[in-house]
Image (cartoon, rainbow, N blue to C red):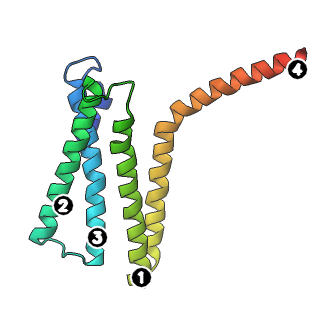
Amino acid sequence: MGLTCASLILDSGVIPVGSDAYPYFVAVQNGLTSALAVCLLINGFVGFQLYEDGTTLSVWLLRLVSFAFFVITFMVSLATFKTWAGLSPTHTLGLFVVLYLVSGIALAVYIIMQIILVVNTLEDRWPLGDIAFGTFFLIIGQVILIGTQSLVKISNSLSALSNTTGKLRNL
C-alpha cells in the first residue's frame, strides 16, 4: 500500500522533480520496492518448512530483513541523488546493483522456489500456469517500462546507420 501511494505521488507529479522533497520520496519508493522483493523471497521459504509461518522467528525475520533492505536501498538512493559516498546522478552503479540486480535475483529465486514447491508437493499443476502468467506479465511490464527509452535510442542509432549506409551506397 505504501509503495502504491509513493508511486502515485511521484508519477502524478504531486512532488515536482526539482523540489527538495523529491529525492526523499524516490528513495522511499526504491526502498519499499527492494523490501517487497526480499519479503517475497523470505515468504517463499515458508513452503519448505525451514520455519513455520506466523511464529516469532518468521515474523521477526521478515520484518528485520525487509527493514534492512529498505534502509540499504533508501540510503543508496539518497546518496545517489545527493552525491554522497562516491555516488552521483551520473554514477548510478550502486543504485542499479541494489535496486535492480539484488531485487531481480530475489524475485528469480522466489519464482524458482515456487516452481520447485509446486512440482514436488502438489498433485495439481495448475499453479504452474499462475506462476508463468505472473512471470510473463512482470517481464512484459519491465520491458515496456525500461525498453521504451532503449528502443528510442536504438531507433536513433539505426536511423543514423541507415542514413550513413544509404549515403555510402550512393557513392
Q: Are marks 4 and 3 in contact (CB under 8 Å)?
A: no
Task: Identify the element where label 2 is drawn.
Answer: helix
Residue assigned mark 4: 169
Residue 8 location, x and y as percent? 28, 35
Query: Which of disc 3 and disc 4 is earlier in sequence?
Result: 3
Q: Are marks 2 and 3 in contact (CB under 8 Å)?
A: no
Q: Which mark is residue 32?
A: none
Query: Which of disc 1 and disc 4 is earlier in sequence?
Result: 1
Q: Is residue 6 visible?
A: no
Amino acid beneath label 4: Arg
Residue 6 drawn above or below residue 23: below
Q: Which mark is residue 45?
A: 3
Query: Which of disc 3 and disc 1 is earlier in sequence?
Result: 3
Mark 4 and mark 3: Cα distance apart in space: 60 Å
Q: Residue at x 16, y 62 (%)?
A: 61
Residue 111 location, x and y as percent? 41, 64
Residue assigned mark 1: 120
Task: Identify the element where label 1 is drawn.
Answer: helix
Amino acid beneath label 2: Leu
Which residue is outermost to the front?
86
Amino acid beneath label 3: Phe
Mark 1 and mark 3: Cα distance apart in space: 14 Å
Query: Which of disc 3 and disc 2 is earlier in sequence?
Result: 3
Q: Which class describes the residues within 10 Å of circle 2: few (<14), some (14-19), or many (20+)?
A: some
Task: Identify the element where label 4 is drawn.
Answer: helix
Residue 85 location, x and y as percent? 25, 30
Mark 4 and mark 1: Cα distance apart in space: 60 Å
Q: Nearer the viewer, mark 4 or mark 1?
A: 4
Q: Is residue 40 visible?
A: yes
Q: Which mark is residue 62?
A: 2
